[in-house]
Image (cartoon, helix red, strand yellow):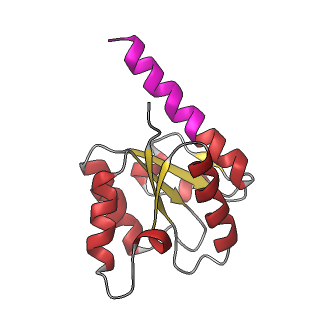
Amino acid sequence: MPGPKVFISYSQTDADRAWIRAFAESLRRHGAKVWLEEFEVHAGESLREAIEEGLRTSDIVVWLVTPESVGRPNLFFEIGAAVGMGKRVVAILPKDLDPTLLPDPLRSRRFLLRESPDRTAEDLLSATSAESAKAVSSN
């Protein structure tokens, strides 16, 4: 069975791009297909259209939340689009971020704490594959 397609959203001001790339590569090594802006959007392409297509074609939408990104408008657009499309929505938080700061659609779902890129990728995929296995066995 092919792995899920994971859309990764992060703040353009996120200084930890090395962690984000390592997380995306770890997901790929574990069999997931990854949509990450820097891999998928080329110079001159519409960012908004590319994001909408990435959201539409993904199984799981992940937000790498930082204190700076909690209130950004694009986060609300992407959350609304993903929830409206019925996507699995997962926030990944740094350990020192208060979860009550999350917008309600993220706060009302189980989130993951940010660990090493490999550990976080494993946590994400094991949590989502366990749920998929449960759904298959109940049919």
Is residue 14 depicted above or below 109 in this figure?
below
Q: Nearer the viewer, residue 82 or 122?
A: 122
Q: Quadrant of residue 132?
A: top left
Q: Residue drawn at (28%, 80%), measured in percent from left and top?
A: 46
Rendering coords of residue 56 (x, y %): 27, 54
| Residue 96 counted in the magenta span | no
- Horizontally, residue 139 falls left or right of residue 1, namely left
Quadrant in which the C terminus is drawn: top left
Rendering coords of residue 82 (x, y %): 32, 53
Magenta segment, prevailing SS (helix, strand or loop): helix
| Residue 128 counted in the magenta span | yes
Outermost top residue: 138
Q: Residue drawn at (59%, 33%), measured in percent from left and top?
A: 126
- Horizontally, residue 67 falls left or right of residue 72, namely right
Outermost bottom residue: 44
Rendering coords of residue 5 (x, y %): 42, 48
Q: Residue drawn at (47%, 26%), measured in percent from left and top?
A: 131
Q: Nearer the viewer, residue 67 or 114?
A: 114
Quadrant in which the N terminus is drawn: top left
Q: Which residues are magenta?
A: 125-139
Is residue 54 depicted above or below 107 in this figure?
below
Q: Nearer the viewer, residue 81 or 8?
A: 8
Outermost right residue: 116
Q: Residue drawn at (52%, 52%), measured in percent from left and top?
A: 91
Label count reads: 0
- Horizontally, residue 66 falls left or right of residue 40, namely right
Rendering coords of residue 53 (x, y %): 28, 62
